[in-house]
Image (cartoon, helix red, strand yellow):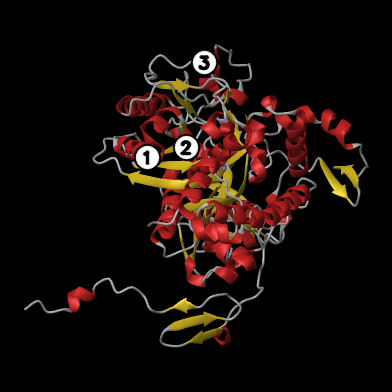
Amino acid sequence: MARLPVIVGFGGISPAGRSSLHHGYRRLVLDRLTTAAARETRLSLATLMGLVGKRGDSWTDQFGDKVDLDPFLDAISDRILEGTLIRRLEKNLFDPDHIPFHKRITLSGRNTQPVEFVLSRRHLPEPLPEGWQVSDDPDHPGKLHVVATDHLEVLLSCQRESDVNTAGQLPSGFDPEVLYPARSHPRGLQMTVFAASDAINSLGIDWQTVTSHVAPDQVSVYAGSGMSQLDYNGFGGLLQARLCGRKVTSKQLPLGYAEMPADFVNAYILGNLGTTGTNVAACATFLYNLRQGIRDIQSGTHRVAIIGTSEAPLVAEIFDGFTTMGALADDNKLRELDGLSRGERPFHRRACRPFGTNVGFTLAESAQFVVLFDDQLALELGAPIHGAVNDVFVNADGFKKSIAGPGVGNYLTMAKAAAATRNLLGEQGLRERTYVQAHGTGTPQNRTTESRILSRVAETFGIRDWPVTAVKAYLGHSLASAAGDQLVTSLGVWRYGFIPGITTIGETAGDVHTDGLDILLQHKEVDADSIEAVIINSKGFGGNNASASVLSPVKTEQLLTNRYGTTAMSAYRQRRESALQRVHDYDTAASSGNFSTTYQFGENVLDDADIELNSVALKVRGRGPEVSLQVPDHYREYLQDRD
């Protein structure tokens, strides 16, 4: 019997805020929450944004002055809301009004005369360009007089305005760099440290307790990014530095790799010795990694899997690339869409409009991590149960006319995910107790192709009014992290009972397929216990399609009760109490500004003396159970001579 991959922890950071304890989800449905829950969400965001913090027993504002918390939160409520979700580009990452670039120009002297100029000796290029004559300048001591007899090509420093001024940005004022010793780390890795720490802290179980029960080779980490680290501290700076007259640093190349989020989790947060890596699958990366993790647990080779992505694509060059492709909702397109004049500011908050009349997607940054245990370990350690991953399916598109265009592979993944859900819920359960977290990018191509796929799958399985939502309407498209955003939002639905609607549109576009679907334009209140599964859909450039079937916590516990019995589940719930208390304590501290970010640089480093080795097992000092060297022999029968 395959082991069930149970979601026991999750965390991250997105334009909606901190993911653990459903804070990010609650920002999406803030207007439907109770007064107490809404206050908790505003407080969580206010501390993230540096607007308020706790010193001793007193609350202080960003200037260090004491404040009365509740009236202060009321006073800054609008500021909190305006500084989250999709909004006009802020200038903390780059200035969209003054983006530097070089324009290539050729200088020539008047009347065929050479070009003459004065140059500092330290700026003299070596070797000299062809046609240059250099001598000391008598009128400028220490300077050189240059005569360029041929046409002189130079790069002139210029500035331009961004065509796109909208993005899903982390909450205003939040800076992951200040939470740990971030030594010139790319932003994606800074976000990784925060997000992975948030997920581990949400367990409510000390990590050393986990590793004392699990052999070092039975933990896997699959985490990465789709775009690599393209800001100046990563590959971006590696490629820009010499052209900008600056030096390449020793960190830009190694820290730029796409799998570096996994490497950081292993080396600086968990000290993991198990399996590691990432799948790079464009916008489907999170689900590809999730598939790797659940396969490890289902097969029994691993008992713990950490799954994550961190994408920090809000750099001018990436905006430029997607804009050139015509993929983004730029300001002019948004104005035209809404009938605004050129001088009017577009509705940046409503830039992403999945399944409505739309003009392109909205770029976003996000880092999301989930922690999976096998079912037996979850019960043994009393871990919180937020749900379980039934299965994840991945398929390519086959032959394609356009590498960026959608294809037929998503039919396979969605149909398989629906069938896998039917296996556990039955025909009626699939039809009546599930909904869809659509990829929903907000592009004209996506609205027709994805809605057609969902509609045909609904028709095939006899589903009527299948609820469909798309959280990119709030968060934007975080590329590799997109399905991670969808997953943590789904976990919030089971806690609070509201499926966030696509509130950026008033109606679906005329070419959207709606047969069998209920595309939610408003928040839909549901009985959380009656929604037993969600299907998460993801589509990526190049023909990368993935769909996941994820089970609710109630359904998960029903399955575990069937397998282990009511007595075992009662004992589990008693053990879980201490974990839930620790989770509550972490949440209280984090909402006060103490995020408990883990970054262990140079600590507990292992060497040869920490390894005990014999022919049947390997033991790592201080690391729980030994690693068996009795590895499976898959090819024994190949050694037998049939003749």
Residue type at tag 3: Glu
Towards the viewer: 91 or 361:
361
Dot 2 falls on a residue whose secondary structure is strand
Q: Nearer the viewer, mark 3 or mark 1?
A: 1
Residue 353: image location, x then y, percent:
51, 24
Image quadrant occupied by the C terminus: bottom left
Q: Residues within 10 Å of mark 3 (few under 14, many from 20)?
A: few
* 1 or 2: tag closer to the N-terminus: 1
Q: Residue at x 50, y 44 (%)?
A: 558
Q: Nearer the viewer, mark 2 or mark 3?
A: 2
Residue hosting label 2: 533
Q: Residue at x 71, y 38 (%)?
A: 172
Question: Within the image, what quadrant is residue 139 found in?
Answer: bottom right
**Please, is residue 375 above or below residue 446 in the view?**
below
The answer to whether one can see residue 102 in this image is: no
Residue 122: image location, x then y, percent:
64, 62
The answer to whether residue 259 is left or right of residue 10 is: left
Residue type at tag 2: Ala
Residue 621: image location, x then y, percent:
58, 81
Residue hosting label 3: 336
